Image: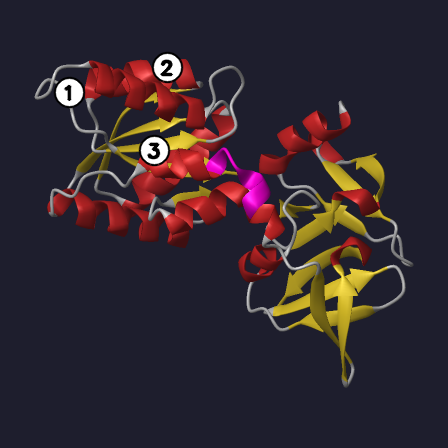
Amino acid sequence: MSISALIIDDEQLAREELRYLLDQVGGVDVLAQGCNGIEAVELIQQHHPDLVFLDVQMPGLDGLAAVERLLSLRKSRPAGEAHPLPQIVFATAYDQYAVRAFDVNAVDYLLKPFDRTRVEQALQRVRARVADAQPAPQLDALLRLLHYPQAAAARQPQRLVVQAQSRLLLVDQAEICFAAIDEGVIRVVTQSFEGQSKCRTLEDLLELLDPALFWRVHRGYVVNINHIREVVPWFKSSYQLRMNDKKQTEVPVSRAQTKRLRELFNL
């Protein structure tokens, strides 16, 4: 079953990457692309797609504000005249509050950089909803959750269990410099020691970490922004982060995360 879709993202490379993966997976007719929330609202009203891939962080009217605008427009129309909302798959590079809220409300999401397997999983869920004529999930409830991130932050555990040799240590999150995954093993590095997390994936680890402190700069790395010692210009306008652990480890910043890096440090 082919489904119609829009791609809304302010980064051209992200749009191209997602379009490439969708072409590889097949069964998706991309009707149009946009680069901000205003275009998202206009294109959705024009095309009435089955699915919208919507970036969360965009200048001006962002993805969440675009959803609010759609909900407001829909409520203002007479009963029977409003088109059903499309299924929405949010894209986000770092907003872990959003990720948790999406999970709670059964709205799907993709973390940048995009992964083909994850795109396929999202499409399977969307196809099931479209085939069963299921309405889009309760986006108004999602937005209410996102407007109160303090409640999510209050539930974050402050300490993390890290295995160092035969010992299980309780480590304050603020002491963690970065975490890295290699061959399925997650290494947790502080200024005084290194250990391993029992989490299976970095996604699982991020669920335990404070999203105000920790940032997934690369598919294989999560860093504590308070432990970044230096931003190092690298090859072809890319960057590495020199951390303040004992080894002053240099962590790569992925292409998809370069935008946030520049915003974070006003580069």
Q: Secondary structure at mark 3?
A: helix
Residue at 29% in and 39% down: 138
User: In the image, residue 160 lies at what x, y percent?
Assistant: 70, 65
Looking at the rendered image, the quarter that the N terminus falls into is top left
One can see residue 114 in this view: no
Q: CA distance from mark 2 to mark 3?
A: 20 Å
Q: CA distance from mark 2 to mark 1?
A: 19 Å
Give whichever of discs 2 and 1 has the lower sequence position: 2
User: In the image, residue 28 lies at what x, y percent?
Assistant: 24, 38
- State the residue position of label 2: 39
Crowding at label 3, few (<14), some or many (≥20) Cα neighbours within 10 Å?
Answer: few
Q: Is residue 144 magenta?
A: no
* Disc 2 to disc 3: CB gap under 8 Å: no
* Disc 2 to disc 1: CB gap under 8 Å: no
Pick the residue in front: 257 or 236: 257
Task: Give the residue type that dot 3 points to.
Answer: Asp
Give whichever of discs 1 and 3 has the lower sequence position: 1
Crowding at label 2, few (<14), some or many (≥20) Cα neighbours within 10 Å?
Answer: some
Residue 69 is tagged as none
Mark 1 or 3: the one toward you: 3
Give whichever of discs 2 and 3 has the lower sequence position: 2
Q: Which residues are magenta?
A: 146-151
Judged by its main secondary structure, the magenta piece is helix
